[in-house]
Amino acid sequence: MPKIALWIITISNDQSINDIATRLSEEGLTVKEILEEIGCITGSADEVTAERLKRVKGVVDIAPDMHIDVGPPGSEETW
């Protein structure tokens, strides 16, 4: 069974972000958030689907979403 991962998709600003989100969903992305202010869409899909999503018109980049923890205030260690 393919492993599902979280992705951050950067989109171009020459099209409606909602239209691009709809196309991504039709191609297999489970859309989590549409971040219109920064031109990104987050969602989950397997790696094969993520590769296919790169060909959707309006997609500029797809990168894995990573958990980042800056730690408590005054902590020496981050990540």
Image (cartoon, rainbow, N blue to C red):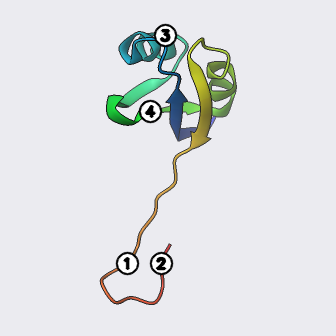
Q: Earlier in the sequence, mark 2 or mark 3?
A: 3
Task: Give the residue at x 49% y 10%.
Answer: 23
Find residue 23 and name its label.
3
Dot 1 and dot 2 residues touching (CB under 8 Å): yes
Which mark sits nearer the N-terminus, 2 or 4? 4
Report which residue position mark 1 lands on: 71
Q: In the image, what residue type sits under mark 4? A: Cys
- Please name the residue that numbered disc 2 is placed on: 78
Circles 3 and 4 in contact, beta carbons < 8 Å:
no
Q: Callout 3, which amino acid?
A: Arg
Q: CA distance from mark 1 to mark 4?
A: 25 Å
Observer-side mark, 1 or 4, equals: 4
Q: Amino acid at mark 2?
A: Thr
Relative side of 74 to 67, left or right: left
Q: CA distance from mark 3 to mark 1?
A: 37 Å
Q: Residues within 10 Å of mark 1 (few under 14, many from 20)?
A: few
Residue 62 drawn at (x, y percent): 60, 34
Name the residue tied to disc 4.
40
Q: CA distance from mark 2 to mark 3?
A: 37 Å
Res. 37 visible in picture: yes
Q: CA distance from mark 2 to mark 4?
A: 25 Å
